[in-house]
Image: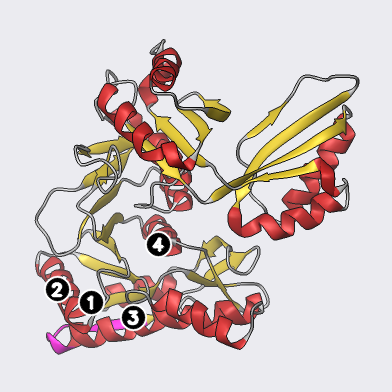
Amino acid sequence: MAIIVQKYGGSSVGTPEKIKNVANTVVNKVKAGNSLVVVVSAMGDTTDDLIALARQITDNPDKRELDALLSTGEMMSCALLAMAIKDLGYDAISYTAYQIGIKTSGQYGKSLIDDINAERMKKSLDEGKIIIAAGFQGINDEGDITTLGRGGSDTTAVAIAVKLNGVCEIYTDVDGIYSVDPRKYKNAKKLDEIDYEEMLELSSLGAQVMHSRSIELAQKYNIPVYVGLSNSNIRGTVIKGVDTMNLESKPVTGLATSDEDIAITVKDIKNDINIISNLFESVAEKKINVDMISQTAPINGKVNVSFTIPKDDMKECLNILKSYFDNNQIDIDEDITKFSIVGIGMKTTSGVVAKMFKLFRENNIAVKMITTSEIRITCAIKQEDKMKTISVIAEKFNL
């Protein structure tokens, strides 16, 4: 008997009718002889509504209390889905993170899963119960509720699949993973399969189908993940390892964009590695994610350092910078889009960078910053150039 861990996103459980539809889908899987654990997100826009509610109380909600508030959204979805399944004549039980021992560490609002005590879930499955688990949340060493950050229910589902040695299926409001966001490029192609590395890069760069930490976890434990449309027979996309895929794949698999970052430039820094090291250590201590970094060549012993961070962390990062540098040394550029192409085929294909920059030149697309990896090229461009760049690159790379 296979253990299947399914995850349903907020749009899939957004109304009582949708919850009933999910209940029917789950019951049909059980009828086929499977054991089911179902991880759910909060209904629809509940998380956003709860954040807005908190901000009506205070402009700066306490992070511990905010996590306690936000976790109620998933608890509500759990209980309602369990009720719907029981109404169909099947035994279901809802569990919070505390009840199934999802241990977390790190900051409130973006905690990491350390471990899960799977014994209670195994007992319930052995008893023939369908488990409905609250995604997005955990319990830290102090016994406090913590949340895993946006998309954290994906990570919950993969982590449970790892602990139960099960199969993981992620159901959402899209019918798979596309080479390009189809809302931005109408000719985008749906992928039958994609490598962990490629999906991880795309997720971290702005593709919003999957939470990047869930992909890291799936890759670490070699758990294939199916991504598809809720309550549909349309074939979705499988995320899996490269050794099971076509190694002669095209060089670029997909592209992603993000408008969620800003670029900070610190000018006229003494060319001293200790200063730069101390700066980024201070930023790291605040759990601020630095992505693209560039440094000019020294002139008269001085350099400029530029880097990107999430917009939400700008205020905290500026406070750190002002403890090291004068205000007139710090420039903020909010007019950036991170544009990335990703493909495992780049490891063995030359000329991808040349082709990309030739297209940029021909279409008058200015590049502010560049960073690369073995399978990725990321450029910071002007936001006004985003749609043009997507269209040009997607067409020429057949995405």
Amino acid carrying label 1: it is Gly
Q: Residue 90 colored magenta?
A: yes
Mark 1 vs mark 2, CA separation in Å: 12 Å
Residue 339 x %, y %? 45, 36
Residue 179 x %, y %? 28, 37
User: Please, is residue 227 above or below residue 338 in the view?
Assistant: below
> With 395 as the anchor, is 268 left or right in this view?
right
Mark 2 vs mark 4, CA separation in Å: 20 Å
- Which secondary structure, mark 1? loop
Which residues make up the magenta segment? 87-94
**N-term mark: 2 or 4:** 2
Mark 4 vs mark 1, CA separation in Å: 18 Å
- Which secondary structure, mark 3? helix
Amino acid carrying label 4: it is Ile
Q: Residue at x 32, y 70 (%)?
A: 10
Quadrant that contains the N terminus: bottom left
The reply to whether discs 4 and 1 touch (Cβ–Cβ < 8 Å) is no
> With 265 as the anchor, is 104 left or right in this view?
left
**N-term mark: 1 or 2:** 2
Q: Which mark is residue 27?
A: 2
Q: Residue at x 79, y 45 (%)?
A: 281
**N-term mark: 3 or 4:** 3
User: Please, is residue 135 above or below residue 245 in the view?
Assistant: below
- Which secondary structure, mark 4? helix
Q: Which mark is residue 128?
A: 1
Disc nearest the viewer among 1 and 2 = 2
Circle 1: is it few (<14), some (14-19), or many (20+) Cα within 10 Å? some
Look at mark 3 in the image and give the residue it sits on: 78
Look at mark 4 in the image and give the residue it sits on: 160
Disc nearest the viewer among 3 and 2 = 3
Q: How many numbered marks appear? A: 4
- Which secondary structure, mark 2? helix
